C-alpha cells in the first residue's frame, strides 16, 4: 500500500523550512479521510495544543540541565554527568524524584489555595507559548493582538505567586510573595514601554507581523540593528530577567534571606510546578525578545525554526551567564533601577523611535547616539549612589 | 569616571573566560578541579593512616603477630579482640586464632602500630569501608586483616623499608647468636 | 459547522455560570483573601466572554488592567492591613435591608432602561469587527480630548502619591 501525497499538501512546497507545518497538514489530511469537518478543526487545535503542552515541560527539563551544566563550567566544575551520557537523563531522574517525594502541606495552611497556586502558575506560562512564532507559519494562534496578549497573560503570573505565598502561612513565603509582586509590577512597566518602539515601527501588535516587518535584505533587517532597537532590547531583556525572577533579580527567592521565598512550603511535584513555570517563562520571554528585536525566525540560509531556536538558545545562555556572574541586587537598588533608570530611558527611547521613523540614515544614527549618550549620562548622574558625608565626632576630653 | 556598565561587562568577561578555560586548561591554570571519584582517584599521601591491618611475610601462614595482646590492651576504644591459637598439646602456639578489629569502633589513633613490638600491625590506607549495617558489618576478621608485606611496602615504602631493615638486622643478629662461635670468630677475625 | 457553534454557545453559558458563582463568592465568602481571588477569577471569566464576542483587545486590556493591576492592588491592600488577611470577616451588617432596597431600585431602573433601548441588531453590525488599528486611530483622532483628560487624572494621582510619600518637614525649633 502506498501513501499518496494528499492534494492539499501539494500546494505547500516540501522543504526543511516547512517541515513541521507540512507534518501537521499531512496528519490533518490523513484524518480528513474518515473524520467530519468539525472534528478536523478540533484535531487541528489539539495537535497544536499537545505539541505546546509537551514542548513546555520538555524545554523546562532540559533548561535545568543546561543551566546546571553552564553554571558548573563557569564555576570550574562538571555539571551533572552521571545519569546517561553527559547527564542527558538527569532531568528525567529529577522528575521521578519529584513525583515520588512526599507532598507536605503545612498544618495551618489554606489547603485549597495552597493546592491551586502551583497549578495556576503553570497556566499563564503555557498560555504565552500560543503567540510565540516558532517559525514561518508556526505561530499556534496568530492573534492580531499577540503582543498585548503576552503582556496581559504574563501579568497574571503575580496572582498564583500571591496565592502560594499567602496560603503557606509562613513569614518567608509571605515576604517572598510581597517582594515578587513589588518587583514584577515595577519591571512590567519598563518592559511594556520597551516594547512600544517595536509596535510603532511595525505598526502591528501581532507577533507574526512584527517578525515579517524585520525581513529586509538577507532577512537581516532586525530591529536590534538600530539605536532604539539596541536600547529597547537591553531594557526588555533586563526586565525579562527580572520578570521571571532570575538572578541577579532573584530577590523573591533569595536563599540567604528568605529560605526559598514564596515556594518555601512546597515540596514534591508542587515545587516542581513552580520551577516549571519559572523556566518556561524564561524560555517564552527569551522567545518574545527574539521575536521583537532579533528578527524572530528571520535569517539567511537556515530553516526558520532553526533560526528561532538558535537565537532563543543564545539568549537563554546569556540569562544563565548572568546567573553565573552577578550577585543579587539590594531591594532598594532593584526598585530604583526600574523606576529611576529604566523607565526614563524607555520614554526617551520612544521619543527617539518617533524621530527615527521620519529620518533613518547615517545622520540619524549620529544624533540618536548623541541623544542616547546624553540621556544615559544624565540618568547615571541623577542615579549616582548617595554616600552620606562621613561624620567625625570629637571626643570630649 | 569609568564608562557606565563597564564593571558589569568586565565581570561577565571573567566568567566567560572561566567557562572557556574549563574545557582545555589544567586545574591549576583555570581548568576543572573536580576529581571524578570512583573512576579517577587522587593518590593518598604516604603517611595517611586509616584502620589497622596485619602484615605477613610471604604466605598468610607466616604471620608476624604472636597474639601477645599488647595492642588489645592499649587500644583506647577497645576495638581489638585476640584469641591465642593452641597447638595439639594445648600450649599457646604464639599465633592468633582469632584477630578481630571492629572498624566501627576504631578511631584511627594508631596506638596499636606504636606499641606492637613485633612490627605486625600497621595503619592502612583503606577508606572505602562502607557496610550495610553497623553491628557486625564493620567487624574485620583475621582473614580480611591479613595483608602481605609487599602491600605494606607499596603503600608506605619509607616505613616498610625501615622496618624491613630492622627486622633483617635482628634476624642476622639472632642467626649469629644461634650459630657456633667458630663461624662468628672467623668472621670476627676477618673483620679485625 | 453547527456542532462547533452549539458547543461554543453552551461553553459560553457555562462560562457565564462560573462567573456568577465566583461573583457570588466575592460578596459572600468570609475570608477576604478568598474574596479577592474570586474577584480575579470573575474578571478573567469576563475576559473569556469578551474573547467569545471577538473583542480580543478588550479581553487583553481587561486582564492587564483588572487582574494584573487592580486585583494585585486589592491583594496588596489586604496583606498590608494588619490582622485582616487571616480573619474570617462577616460580609454583612445591620444596614443590609436598606442596601437591598437600594439595590432593587437600581436593578429595576437598569432593567427598564435595557428594555426601553432599541437594540439595532443588524447583520452589518454583527459583521463589523473592531480592529486594534481602528481603536488606536479613534483614540488619537476623534476622542483625543477625553483621552488626554484621563491622563490628567493619572498625573494627579502620581503627584498625590509623591505628596503622601514625602517626608514631613522637621518641626521648627521653638
Image (tube, grey):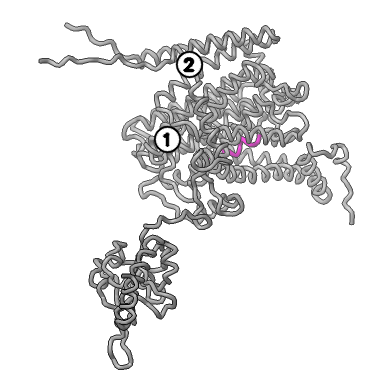
Instruction: Tell me what residue is drawn at x 41 percent, y 30 percent.
Output: C76
Q: Which chain carries label 1?
A: A
Give the quarter of the image for residue C13: top right
Give the quarter of the image for residue A131: top right
Mark 2 closeness class: few <14, some 14–19, many ≥20 residues within 10 Å: few
- Residue C40 in the figure: left or right of residue B105: right
Residue under label 2, please give it: B2
Residue B7 appears in the figure: yes
Q: Residue A290 location in percent, x, y? A: 65, 29
Q: Residue A348 carries which label?
A: none
Q: Is the magenta stretch mostly helix, strand or loop?
A: helix
Question: Which of the two marks, 2 or 1, is nearer to us in this view?
Answer: 2
Helix, strand or loop at disc 1? helix
Q: Is residue A2 magenta?
A: no
Q: Nearer the viewer, residue A19 or B42?
A: B42
Q: Nearer the viewer, residue B103 or B67?
A: B67
Q: Residue B136 location in percent, x, y? A: 36, 73
Instruction: Tell me what residue is drawn at x 40 percent, y 13 percent.
Output: C160
Q: Which of C149 and A86 is in front in this view?
A: A86
Residue B130 appears in the figure: no
Q: What stretch is highlighted in magenta?
A: A121-130
Quarter the C terminus of chain C occupies: top left
Residue under label 1, please give it: A177
On screen, C87 above or below B164?
above
Q: Does the magenta stretch include residue A129?
A: yes
Q: Residue B181 location in percent, x, y? A: 29, 81
Quarter the N terminus of chain C occupies: top right
Q: Mark 2 lies on which chain?
A: B
Amino acid at each position: 500500500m502506498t501513501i499518496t501525497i494528499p492534494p492539499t499538501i501539494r500546494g505547500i512546497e516540501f522543504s526543511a523550512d516547512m517541515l513541521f507545518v507540512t507534518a501537521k497538514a499531512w496528519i490533518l489530511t490523513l484524518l480528513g479521510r474518515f473524520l467530519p469537518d468539525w472534528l478536523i478543526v478540533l484535531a487541528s487545535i489539539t495537535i497544536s495544543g499537545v505539541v505546546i503542552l509537551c514542548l513546555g515541560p520538555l524545554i523546562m527539563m532540559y533548561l535545568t540541565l543546561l543551566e546546571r551544566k553552564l553554571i558548573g563550567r563557569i564555576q570550574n566544575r562538571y555539571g551533572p554527568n552521571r545519569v546517561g551520557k553527559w547527564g542527558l537523563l538527569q532531568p528525567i531522574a529529577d522528575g521521578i524524584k519529584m513525583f515520588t517525594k512526599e507532598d507536605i502541606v503545612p498544618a495551618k495552611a489554606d489547603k485549597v489555595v495552597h493546592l491551586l497556586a502551583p497549578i495556576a502558575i503553570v497556566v499563564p506560562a503555557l498560555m504565552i507559548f500560543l503567540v510565540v512564532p516558532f517559525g514561518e507559519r508556526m505561530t499556534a494562534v496568530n492573534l492580531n493582538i499577540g503582543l498585548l496578549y503576552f503582556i496581559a497573560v504574563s501579568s497574571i503570573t503575580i496572582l498564583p505567586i500571591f496565592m502560594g505565598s499567602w496560603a503557606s502561612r509562613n513569614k518567608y513565603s509571605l515576604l517572598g510573595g510581597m517582594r515578587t509582586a513589588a518587583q514584577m509590577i515595577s519591571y512590567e512597566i519598563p518592559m511594556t514601554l520597551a516594547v512600544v518602539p517595536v509596535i510603532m515601527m511595525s505598526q502591528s501588535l501581532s507577533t507574526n507581523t512584527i517578525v515579517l516587518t524585520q525581513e529586509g535584505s538577507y532577512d537581516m533587517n532586525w530591529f536590534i540593528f538600530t539605536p532604539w532597537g539596541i536600547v529597547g532590547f537591553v531594557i526588555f531583556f533586563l526586565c525579562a530577567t527580572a520578570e521571571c525572577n532570575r538572578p541577579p533579580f532573584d530577590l523573591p527567592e533569595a536563599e540567604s534571606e528568605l529560605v526559598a521565598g514564596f515556594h518555601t512550603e512546597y515540596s514534591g511535584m508542587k515545587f516542581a510546578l513552580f520551577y516549571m513555570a519559572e523556566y518556561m517563562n524564561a524560555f517564552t520571554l527569551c522567545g518574545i525578545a527574539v521575536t521583537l528585536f532579533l528578527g524572530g525566525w528571520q535569517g539567511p540560509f537556515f530553516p526558520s525554526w532553526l533560526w528561532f531556536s538558535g537565537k532563543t538558545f543564545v539568549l537563554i545562555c546569556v540569562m544563565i551567564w548572568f546567573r553565573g556572574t552577578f550577585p543579587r541586587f539590594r531591594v532598594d537598588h532593584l526598585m530604583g533601577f526600574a523606576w529611576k533608570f529604566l523607565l526614563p530611558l524607555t520614554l526617551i527611547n520612544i521619543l527617539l523611535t518617533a524621530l527615527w521613523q521620519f529620518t533613518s540614515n547615517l545622520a540619524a544614527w549620529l544624533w540618536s547616539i548623541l541623544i542616547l549618550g546624553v540621556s544615559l549620562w544624565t540618568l547615571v548622574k541623577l542615579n549616582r549612589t548617595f554616600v552620606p558625608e562621613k561624620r567625625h565626632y570629637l571626643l570630649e576630653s | 569616571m569609568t564608562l557606565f556598565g563597564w564593571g558589569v561587562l568586565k565581570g561577565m568577561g571573567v566568567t566567560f573566560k572561566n567557562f572557556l578555560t574549563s574545557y582545555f586548561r589544567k586545574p591549576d591554570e583555570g581548568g576543572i578541579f573536580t576529581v571524578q571519584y570512583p573512576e579517577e582517584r587522587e593518590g593518598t599521601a604516604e603517611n595517611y593512616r586509616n584502620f589497622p591491618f596485619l602484615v605477613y611475610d610471604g604466605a598468610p601462614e607466616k604471620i608476624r603477630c604472636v597474639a601477645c595482646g599488647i595492642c588489645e590492651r592499649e587500644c583506647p576504644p577497645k576495638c581489638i579482640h585476640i584469641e591465642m591459637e593452641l597447638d595439639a598439646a594445648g600450649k599457646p602456639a604464639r599465633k592468633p586464632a582469632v584477630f578481630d578489629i571492629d572498624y566501627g569502633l576504631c578511631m584511627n589513633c594508631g596506638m596499636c602500630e606504636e606499641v606492637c613490638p613485633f612490627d605486625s600491625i600497621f595503619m592502612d590506607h583503606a577508606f572505602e569501608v562502607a557496610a550495610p549495617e553497623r553491628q557486625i558489618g564493620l567487624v574485620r576478621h583475621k582473614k580480611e586483616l591479613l595483608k602481605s608485606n609487599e602491600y605494606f611496602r607499596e603503600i608506605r615504602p619509607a616505613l616498610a623499608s625501615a622496618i624491613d631493615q630492622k627486622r633483617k638486622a635482628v634476624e642476622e643478629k639472632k642467626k649469629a647468636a644461634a650459630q657456633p662461635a667458630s663461624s662468628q670468630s672467623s668472621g670476627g677475625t676477618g673483620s679485625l | 459547522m453547527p456542532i462547533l457553534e452549539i458547543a461554543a454557545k453552551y461553553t459560553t453559558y457555562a462560562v457565564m455560570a462560573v462567573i456568577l458563582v465566583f461573583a457570588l463568592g466575592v460578596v459572600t465568602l468570609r475570608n477576604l483573601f478568598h474574596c479577592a481571588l474570586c474577584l480575579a477569577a470573575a474578571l478573567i471569566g469576563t475576559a473569556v466572554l469578551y474573547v467569545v464576542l471577538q473583542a480580543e483587545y478588550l479581553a487583553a486590556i481587561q486582564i492587564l488592567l483588572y487582574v494584573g493591576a487592580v486585583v494585585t492592588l486589592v491583594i496588596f491592600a489586604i496583606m498590608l492591613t494588619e490582622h485582616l488577611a487571616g480573619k474570617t470577616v462577616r460580609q454583612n451588617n445591620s444596614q443590609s435591608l436598606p442596601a437591598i432596597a437600594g439595590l432593587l431600585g437600581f436593578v429595576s431602573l437598569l432593567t427598564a432602561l435595557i428594555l426601553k433601548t432599541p437594540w439595532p441588531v443588524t447583520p452589518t453590525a454583527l459583521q463589523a469587527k473592531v480592529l486594534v488599528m481602528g481603536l488606536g486611530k479613534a483614540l488619537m483622532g476623534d476622542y483625543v480630548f477625553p483621552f488626554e483628560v484621563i491622563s490628567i487624572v493619572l498625573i494627579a494621582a502620581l503627584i498625590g502619591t509623591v505628596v503622601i510619600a514625602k517626608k514631613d518637614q522637621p518641626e521648627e525649633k521653638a
